[in-house]
């Protein structure tokens, strides 16, 4: 009964109901998402994994109000995605860092705050706090070209955190980085999530990354993208990197791999 009570008190943050999205192109319609149902609760770390073109990024873009569904609906904190954007409910981290080369790291992180009209003194405080959060103290006055790819991505995450949104939407932010840097950033992101309690939706093509980071792993089918399975991750919240050598971790990756095999067979 205690477990049922705990589940009933979970706050739904992102809710998709009967979500459909068809793009109209010169070559005809492209059915990107089909009948997607999903609930992301407060504090979840949800990874989306599936074959290329299955709609993982499209789902994030719908939640961010960057794409408009052609059927069904998505709500973010009980609002439409457009309303959620105006309320600054989420930060978005793209596949590439997207930093302006003529702005310093502090200037890049500060940009959303300038657009939102935060007072200058508060901008400085927020920039200082989020750079500390992503371990970039002392790099405020550097330019993006002076930082490694991994450091640039951390600056991008800091920018998304600067206005203290409770939700982070992350579109394969580490996909272009080498394995050593990726491992380090996975550790840092997990630590950041543990410290801040943010709700994170994370797109990846990496089975180990999904298993290491997530509380839930959403396995998607080939286009039109459907959710074929949601795997609850039984690993403890505290996860040193060497947990990936344990039988428990390998069992999670096996379940994800089997889920992906089944959707390929389905496709």
Image (tube, rainbow, N blue to C red):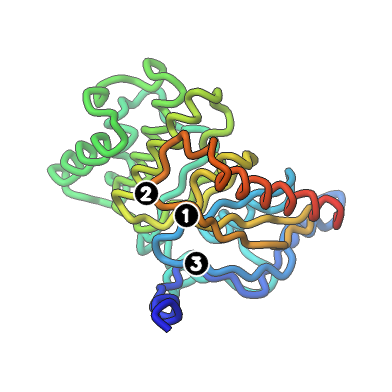
| Quarter of the N terminus within the rendering | bottom left
Above or below for 12 versus 219: below
- Disc 1 from disc 2: Cα separation: 8 Å
Image quadrant of residue 139?
Answer: top left
Question: To which residue does mark 3 refer?
Answer: 14
Above or below for 87 versus 265: below
Closest to the observer, 194 or 173: 194
Q: Are marks 1 and 2 in contact (CB under 8 Å)?
A: yes
Q: Which mark is residue 193?
A: 2
Image quadrant of residue 184?
Answer: top left
Image quadrant of residue 83?
Answer: bottom left
Residue lying at 29% horizontally and 49% vertically, measured from the top left:
195
Residue lying at 82% horizontally and 58% vertically, measured from the top left:
29
Closest to the observer, 147 or 238: 238
| Quarter of the C terminus within the rendering | bottom right
Q: Which mark is residue 45?
A: 1
Residue 9, how many percent across, how many down?
Answer: 39, 78
Judged from the image, the secondary structure of the residue bearing numbered disc 3 is strand
Residue lying at 41% horizontally and 27% vertically, measured from the top left:
152
């Amino acid at each position: 009964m205690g477990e049922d009570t705990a589940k009933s008190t979970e706050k739904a943050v992102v809710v998709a109901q009967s979500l459909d999205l068809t793009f109209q192109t010169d070559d005809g319609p492209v059915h990107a998402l089909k009948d997607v149902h999903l609930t992301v609760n407060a504090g979840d770390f949800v990874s989306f994994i599936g074959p290329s073109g299955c709609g993982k990024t499209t789902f994030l873009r719908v939640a961010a109000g960057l794409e408009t569904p052609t059927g069904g609906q998505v709500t973010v904190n009980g609002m439409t995605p457009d309303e959620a954007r105006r309320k600054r409910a989420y930060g978005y981290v793209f596949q590439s860092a997207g930093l302006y080369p003529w702005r310093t790291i502090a200037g890049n992180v500060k940009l959303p705050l300038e657009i939102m009209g935060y007072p200058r003194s508060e901008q400085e405080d927020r920039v200082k706090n989020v750079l500390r959060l992503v371990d970039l103290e002392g790099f405020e006055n550097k330019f993006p070209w002076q930082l490694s790819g991994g450091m640039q991505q951390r600056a991008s995450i800091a920018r998304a955190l600067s206005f203290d949104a409770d939700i982070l939407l992350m579109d394969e932010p580490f996909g272009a980085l080498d394995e050593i840097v990726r491992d380090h950033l996975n550790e840092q992101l997990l630590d950041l999530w543990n410290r801040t309690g943010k709700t994170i939706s994370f797109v990846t093509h990496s089975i180990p990354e999904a298993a290491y980071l997530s509380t839930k792993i959403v396995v998607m089918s080939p286009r039109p993208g459907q959710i074929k399975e949601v795997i609850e991750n039984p690993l403890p919240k505290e996860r040193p990197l060497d947990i990936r050598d344990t039988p428990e971790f390998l069992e999670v990756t096996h379940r994800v791999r089997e889920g992906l095999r089944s959707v390929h067979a389905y496709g």
